[in-house]
Each structure stands twice: as C-alpha cells, then as structure tokens.
Amino acid sequence: MMDVGRHPNIKLLTNSKVEAIKGYVGNFDVKVLKKTRYVDETQCTACGDCAEVCPVVVPDAYQQGLSSRKAIYIPFPQAVPSASLIDMESCLGTNPIACGKCADKCDKKCIDYDAKDETIEFKVGTVIVATGMDVFDPVILEEYGYTKHENVVTSMEFERLLSAGGPSDGHFIRPTDRQRPKTVGFVQCVGSRCEKIGKPYCSNICCMNTIKDTLLLKDHYPDIQAKVFYIDIRAFGKGFEDLFKRSKEAGVQYIRGIPGEITEDPKSRNLKVMVEDTTSNKIEEHEFDMMVLSVGVTPRLDMPEVQQLLTLSKTPDGFFMEAHPKLKPVDAPSTGIYFAGCAEAPKDVKDSVTQASAAAARAETLLSAGKVKLEAITSTLDTALCRYCATCSRVCPYGAFTVDPKKKTISYIDALCKGCGTCAAECRFGALTMKHFTDEQIVTQIDAHLAEDPGEKVIVFACNWCSYAGADTCGGARLQYPPNQRLIRTMCSGRVDEKFVLHAFRKGAPMVVVSGCHYVDCHYIDANRWTQKRVEKLWDKFEKWGIRPERLLLEWISAAEGQRFQKTMQDIEELRKKVTKEEIEQTVKILTEEEEKDKAKAKKKQADSPTKKKS
Amino acid sequence: MPQDDLKIGVFICECGTNIAGSVDVDSVVANAKKTGNVVYSTKSRYMCSEPGQAEIKKAIKEEKLDRVIIAACSPRMHEPTFRECVASVGMNPYLVDMANIREQCSWVHMGNREAATKKAKDIMKAYVARARYLQPQEEKEIPVERATLIIGGGIAGMQSALDLADAGYQVYLVEKEPSLGGLMSKLAKTYPTMDCAI
C-alpha cells in the first residue's frame, strides 16, 4: 500500500469516482471526480489530535460497526494516504459556531470546511477494472437468525474480532457478554451454492477462509472447540489440502451437513442447531457460544455504473464477462480494457494478484507497442440513408453508435466496432454496410450454390468462431455426413439478415440453417441474442404465410462440437428429403408475392413522403 | 455493384491426397476456367508450400490478377498464409479468399467422389462470385496513449498499478474509499501464508 502511495509513476486518487470515459482503445478520455476530504492530505501528519476533540461518535464501517469512530477520522491506522478526512454527513456543520473544534485543534491548519470537490481530466490508452466485490448480506436468510441472535456473526465480523487492530484489540470475545467463547460453530456456503436466493455459484474463498479461521482460533486458544458445517470442502489450491489437514489435526470437527435453523437459548444466549450429518445419516444437535456465517462473495452493488462507463457485459452470476472464458480470461470484450481481481469472478488474494499482474502485462502489450491495429472488417455508415431509429445503438454489443432520434443525430466510432455485422442485419434502411461481408457478397454466394439443383441443397449460415469452426472440427475428425449442405461463412450469426434467409428460400432451397455460438460463447458479447430474435420472428412470419417453420433451423454449435455438427447435418438431410418439389414451388410463389407486396409498399411510402433533402 | 472486368485466378490445392483423394481436382480446375471472370486456374500438390505460393505470386504478376481464390483447407488454417503471400507481391490481403474444400468437403464425403467433386465446384463457384464484390480493406493503426486508468485500489488494483508503474508507465489509480486496501485490508490474516493482510 505504501509503495503505491509513494510511487512517482502512480497518481493516486482516493475518495474519487470515475465520472466519464469516452473514446476507445489507445485513446480514452477520463473524467474523475475527486471528493474533498476537507483535510489537506499533503499537509496532514495523521497525528489524530483532531479526532480526539471531535464530539461526534458514529459506527465504524471498517470495524464492521463493532466499534465507533469520530466524524473526523483516519479510516484505519495503516491507511494510504495517511491523512484524516471529515465525514460531512455526521459532522455537526461547516459553521464554526456550531463546532469547529477540530480546526481549532489542528496545529498545521490542514482543515478547510469550505474545500470543494475537484474534477480531474486525463487521457489513457488502457483501462484495468479492479472494482472488487461485495460480501453477501445474510439478513434475508432468516433461518440463521443473523438479525435476531447477537452471537451469530458473519465471517467478516469474525475477522475483525480476531484482528489485533480490531474492536476488541485482538481479544476474542462474543458480542452479548464480551466473554471468550469456548465453542464456535461455522456454517459454510451462506450465500453461495444456493439456488433459492439466486446465488448458485461457489464463492471460491469461503472454505479456505474458514479453515484459516479455525487454525487461528486453535493457535490462540487451543482449548476452544470448533466445528464446521459444510456441503463440500473445496481445498483445491497449492498448499490448501495441507492447511485443511492441519485444521483437522488441531481438533477441528468437520460435519457434512448444513443446519436448517439456528435457535437461541434466551437465558445463556447460546446457539443451538439441528443438523443431519450426511456421512452417518444421523440427526445431531449441537450447541455453541458463538456461530460464524461463512458468507459468500457477490457482485458489487455499484457495478452497473462501471458497466455503463465502459459498455461491459455480465455473466449470469453477475460478475463481469471476459472476452473468452478460457483463452482471454483477463481481457474485456472491448480491446484495451482488462479485468483484475473479484470484478471478474470471486477469487482469493493469490489469484487476484496473479490476475492483476496478467492484466498489467496485457495492458503493457499495447502500451509498449505504442500503437494498435484496428479491425479492418467493420461496419460503415451512410448517414444520408439513416432514419435515426436507433436500432443500431440498441443491438451493437460495443456501444459504437450514439443516436438521438429527436435531434436526428447519429455518431459512430468505427474504432469500437469488432465486426459482428448485427447492425447491418438489423438496419431496415440500408444505412449500414458490413465490410467484407456485404449483402451482395452473401446473396451472390447463395445464388451460386443454388444455381443448379437447388432442391437438393441446404444453405447453412455458419459463424466463423463456433459453428464454422465446429464444421472444421467435424472434418478434422473425418466424421462423415451427406454432401448436400452448402456453408456460408459470416463472422457472427448476428450478421445473418432475414433477407438472406428469405432469398435462399426464394431461390428454391428446401431448408436453411442459421448456426452460431452457444449463448454464453458468442465472440461478440451477446450479438447472437439478436440472431435468435430474428429467427423467431421469421418462424412467426412463416406460420402466417403457410410455410412450415421447421424448414428454418437455428442451431448452436461450438468449435469443439464436431460430432454435434455431423449429427445436425445428418438430421437435416432427413428433414430435407421430406420437403417435396411442390412444397418448394409453393414457398417460392408465396415469398415472391410477399417480396412484390413489400416493394409496392415501399414505393407507395416513398411517393407519399416528401423527398428527403440531401445535405 | 460487381466488377465485371476483373481478372480472377483460382488455385486448387490437392493437399497431397487429403483433397485429391475424394475430389477430382482436374475437373474442378477445368470448371473454374469456364467460370465467369476466371482468367487463370491451376492446381498444386500443396498450395501452402513454398513452390505453391511461388506459383500464386508468379500468376498474380504475369496474369495481372485482381482477385485470388484458393480452394484448399479452412481459412481458419491458412488465411493468414495466403494474405501474406499476395501482399508480398503488392495485392491487398483482403482480395484473396479461401474456399474450404477440405474440412468441409473432401474430409467429410470420403468415398463419394462424385458428390464431393460437385460440392467442391459449388464452393469454388460461390467464392468466385463473391470475389467480384471483394474490396481492398485497410487495417488502420492508431497511437496508444502510454498511460493506464485503474479503477479500484484493492489488492488487484494495487498490484496492476505497481507492475505498470515499475515498467515506467503513467498510472492513474482511482479508489472510491478514502484509503487504498479494499476488502483485503479488513482481513485479520490471509491464507495460505497465515500472515497479516496489510
């Protein structure tokens, strides 16, 4: 912490908030609001004289509310920067007549009640998101009586009670009678691996944290009896099993089973639990002086703020989503943004440090090169055709578009575009063109494939990263399938415009397949969500027009799923055989008529509306 | 609009017997020669090999080719190879395209030479049709400001900051709370070393 505070290359902005980030890789303009401390941090010596005279006493958040602090305070003894600040919400007032004791006491005259917040602006090339996590609040799990029974504490409160710098100066006591407990019970997975409260994931750190806690207890007080209630003990890291073994050898009892309820003896204030030990299948009763809820890790409540600033995505667990779960675990989907620590997923100190160094190295790759090559295959915008409907800004996974439908303005930053082509597929006015995968290029491929014997062929749209790669994997494994499918490659399934599908059917294709990455695997964050919506819309239209929707398939096939690709192609061939010549002719007729109707409608609309002035 | 005056070259790879084993490569070459805008077509045992690439470069220069189609393996395998190959003789790398007749044709229709050949021709023709719409593309390069913003001053943010600052880069470390340390600073001890967190 000290090293960071005094490093000449680090500008440390505490008590601060990033207000705005504009731009793209290599060129981000950042605006930070530095809230005033009301104490000049460059002059303050952290002598603490001011806090001594401060008459206001409030709960100390650093000590989990187990002790108190003053309105002017130092967050904790080792804080960096080592300087006091005033909590203006509880300060008696900036009016010196109301109080002003601290300003009078301060010899160096560091305190200024009228100090103002400051806005700082600067430019950076890369961003590292290390926003951390929140700790699960067990209040909603009423069965554990966290709000009813004072001697039930969370693992974070337990940390403070055990700390030499804690509210009890390192003397381990229980809240009700301030006596040292003789028996302590730990309940694992509180707020983790629990579907009913929407926390199905493992928090990663709680098993080892409890093992550590039991070892500390046993080290300090060998006579204390400690029991741990668990589902599984996950001691998977380097040296972890050894710690688990040591804890058991020190006499800590591990019981496989989670108590259903914690009740309190009103007289002794002791806690009682009933639990089924699933190793012996016996119901047991246990009594403790104190119980610790081993609380899990949750995404930060204020995550949406940072998410919006940088157009990031979240996984179903609520943590930030990386560019690829296996191959790019540190990168955000947008170039130049990286993750470190629990913002991306729950992890312990060692893993956080590892990912932080990895994030620094990833950022350095760009910083040391001093330049970055942009994606060549991007969308282009023809503003003359734009009707400012804002569809593009809604579907773009990277926030490359900003549209104001009222003011009729659009801005597009092509440096943010990664080339999925969803915008071009969704734009109804032809204002967006996807380079290298233009409408003409794809339509001409369809025409070429269906020029001869169209009734025998199946048009398969495949995304570059997953389903096209899955077809390659299938080939690599020499998995055979009928030779009637014709693949058309796009970078993302999001590029597959409904007009491509209709064109293929109009040209006499018996079947069309749209294939892409599985939902969470999409290489363009969630562009394939729009693929699904588009195909669903087409199914509805087919239903209305009397075309069998089963002839249009939507398949998610990953790069590794060669067998799935083979099976899909085999199944499709069976379906294709059932499509008769008459059915195809009927479809061609319906779709040609629909196309004519659309053309007539468009013509009428154009005739009715006043001519658009070209600027 | 398609460009109708383009000169397209089509190069079919035998890939040893990987493609030639299931596809009648000669008939694909003959078919290519009859396809619109194709002024040159040939086959090679291994198109990606040095002699194969030399043949492509020679044809681009001698036949003044505007677009090149390589019917061979997956573009996921050798697209970078052929982009580099054509760029070395001055052609924009986005004017070469790969028609996948190995992973998605010869390898999956073994023992069905007739159907595989028919499919290989379709794939080749689809790419020739597409080639008429191909445009040169540019990979733009932009400068990178040599500074990093780190949001969060917990253990992760601090470690990233120190690594980058030690490497000589400017770091802006923004922390919401009045002190560095994050959640870790509230821990009494940390595993696996069982030492103090601060």
Image (tube, helix red, strand yellow):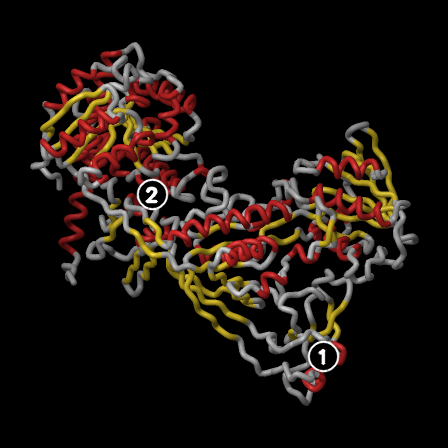
- The Cα atoms of the two marked residues, 2 and 1, are separated by 59 Å
Rate crowding at label 1 as few (under 14), some (14 to 19) or many (20 or more) other CA atoms within 10 Å.
many
Q: Position of residue A185 (x, y in %)?
A: 82, 44
Identify which amino acid the numbered label 1 is placed on. Answer: Cys
Residue on which the image places disc 1: A50
Q: Quadrant of the N terminus of chain B?
A: top left
Residue at left offset 25%, top offset 40%: A437
Residue that lies at the very extreme toward the right in this rendered image: A267
Rate crowding at label 2 as few (under 14), some (14 to 19) or many (20 or more) other CA atoms within 10 Å.
many
Q: Using the rendered image of the protein, determine whether residue A398 is visible from the camera's viewpoint.
A: yes
Residue at left offset 57%, top offset 50%: A341
Of the two numbered discs 2 and 1 on the same chain, state the one appearing first in sequence.
1
Q: Quadrant of the C terminus of chain B?
A: bottom right
Mark 1 — on which chain does it sit? A
Q: Nearer the viewer, residue A148 or A160?
A: A160
Residue on which the image places disc 2: A420
Relative to A13, is A434 above or below?
Answer: above
Q: Is residue A568 left or right of residue A449?
A: right
SS under mark 2: loop
Are callouts 2 and 1 both on one chain? Answer: yes
Residue A89 picture quarter: bottom right
Q: Position of residue B8 (x, y in %)?
A: 13, 32
Identify which amino acid the numbered label 2 is placed on. Answer: Cys
Q: Position of residue A518 (x, y in %)?
A: 44, 34
SS under mark 1: helix
Residue that lies at the very extreme toward the top in this rendered image: B111
Mark 2 — on which chain does it sit? A
Tag shown at residue B23:
none
Residue at left offset 53%, top offset 54%: B163
Pointers 2 and 1 in contact (C-beta within 8 Å): no
Relative to A195, is A145 above or below?
Answer: below
